[in-house]
Image: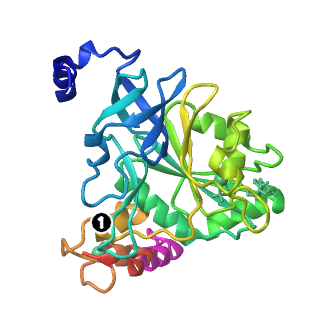
């Protein structure tokens, strides 16, 4: 290997790289290669050996969509990813089996848009809580988007969210008719938003509403499900016409949280997170004496539906 290359490899003379831009963002991952976005254009790049093996033991993927990477031009003029920048945020999906590795769904997003539908598939508040916890854990703000309002009414949609005591900012939408899209656009302007949620709730339809002309990625054409519709098979980044970025992801059936702390579960519910300190620092707010959350239940400052959701989420995680 020529000396200049070797030096470059160590990262010490990165400023001498012959590449058009030093920091690129991963737009899509295809096994041993990735598609990169430099703010203007997309380009395919190979992964240098040290990047491929850099996935630490706990993770399934070395690079995730949204990762910022350093590149160099390889001999044949193609780009090669030589390093990944530290992540500011990360959305992780824990494995059901604690010995299995964690998948990084997206990196460096500023918010997680938890997409649900009023119907088809039915609204599942438990899934919203779990995604909210994962978003907060990874440093992002969770926002709920209740789609397919056209299958009912606006009143029904608002009542559904209120009755479930969803502890998040909620946006209502019909991606089919475009109703509610202006508020959604305003909420997503600037920053990077990752769309998550159950398969079929309308994430890709929302994406196409926000980014006219966005095509299903090539893998998706063959990935029609039994009902003959396209289902997203891998995460992909799209620049928004007015600035900002959206990352579409494949739908998932269930979300596992892995091990979680009581504080993490409580952080999903504002009324519980903001309750005064309990007598015991390790209080789980279930049966302990001097618990301010249980006191809040009595005086009404912690609504019963909110507490019920907290207990349900707590039961689902193995509390440390
Ligand atoms: N009635 C109605 N149907 C919608 C709406 N948004 C999406 N759909 C339909 O719902 C189905 C699923 O939409 P997709 O956008 O593919 O769903 P997705 O969340 O991307 O699904 P995965 O890629 O499998 O995760 C399609 O048939 C859409 O036409 C809506 O607002 N109202
Ligand atoms: Mg999709
Ligand atoms: Zn307590």
How many marks overall?
Answer: 1
Residue 187 at x, y percent in the picture = 59, 38
**Ligand 3 lies in quarter:** bottom left
- Left/right placement of residue 149 relative to residue 32 reads right
Task: Give the quadrant of the C terminus.
Answer: bottom left
> Which residue, as the protein is rendered here, is positioned at the far front?
1
Q: Which residue is mark 1?
A: 263
Q: Is residue 159 above or below residue 52?
A: below
Residue 148 at x, y percent in the picture = 76, 57
- The dominant secondary structure in magenta is helix
Note whether residue 275 is visible.
Answer: no
Q: Is residue 306 magenta?
A: yes
Q: Is residue 42 magenta?
A: no
Identify the residue at horizontal 32%, vertical 41% (top origin).
87
Foreground residue among 305 and 188: 188
Q: Is residue 56 above or below residue 237?
A: below
Identify the residue at horizontal 38%, vertical 65% (top origin).
94
SS assignment at label 1: helix
Residue 241 at x, y percent in the picture = 64, 26
Task: Give the quadrant of the N terminus.
Answer: top left
| In the image, the residue with mark 1 has its CB under 8 Å from the nearest atom of ligand 3 | no
Residue 40 at x, y percent in the picture = 54, 20
- Left/right placement of residue 13 relative to residue 228 reads left
């Amino acid at each position: 290997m020529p000396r200049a290359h070797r030096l470059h490899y160590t990262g010490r003379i990165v400023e001498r790289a012959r590449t058009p831009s030093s920091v690129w963002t991963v737009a899509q991952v295809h096994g041993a290669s990735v598609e990169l976005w430099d703010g203007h254009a997309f380009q395919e790049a190979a992964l240098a050996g040290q990047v491929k093996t850099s996935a630490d033991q706990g993770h399934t993927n070395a690079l995730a969509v949204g990762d910022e990477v350093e590149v160099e031009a390889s001999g044949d003029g193609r780009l090669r990813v030589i390093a990944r920048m530290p992540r500011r945020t990360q959305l992780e999906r824990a494995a059901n089996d604690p010995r299995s590795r964690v998948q990084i769904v997206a990196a460096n997003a500023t918010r997680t848009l938890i997409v649900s539908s009023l119907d088809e598939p039915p609204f599942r508040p438990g899934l919203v809580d779990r995604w909210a916890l994962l978003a907060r854990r990874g440093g992002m703000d969770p926002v709920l988007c209740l789609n397919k309002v056209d299958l009912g009414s606006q009143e029904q949609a608002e009542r559904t969210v209120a009755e479930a005591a969803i502890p998040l900012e909620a946006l209502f939408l019909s991606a089919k008719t475009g109703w509610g899209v202006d508020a959604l656009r305003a909420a997503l302007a600037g920053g990077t938003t990752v769309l998550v949620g159950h398969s079929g709730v309308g994430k890709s339809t929302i994406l196409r509403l926000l980014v006219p002309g966005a095509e299903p990625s090539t893998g998706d054409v063959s990935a029609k499900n039994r009902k003959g519709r396209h289902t997203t098979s891998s995460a992909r980044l799209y620049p928004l016409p007015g600035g900002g970025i959206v990352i579409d992801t494949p739908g998932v059936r269930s979300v596992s949280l892995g091990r979680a702390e009581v504080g993490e579960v409580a952080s999903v519910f504002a009324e519980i997170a903001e309750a005064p300190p309990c007598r015991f620092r390790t209080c789980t707010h279930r049966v302990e004496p001097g618990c301010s959350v249980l006191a809040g239940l009595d005086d009404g400052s912690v609504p019963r539906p909110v507490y019920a959701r907290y207990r349900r989420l707590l039961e689902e995680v193995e509390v440390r």
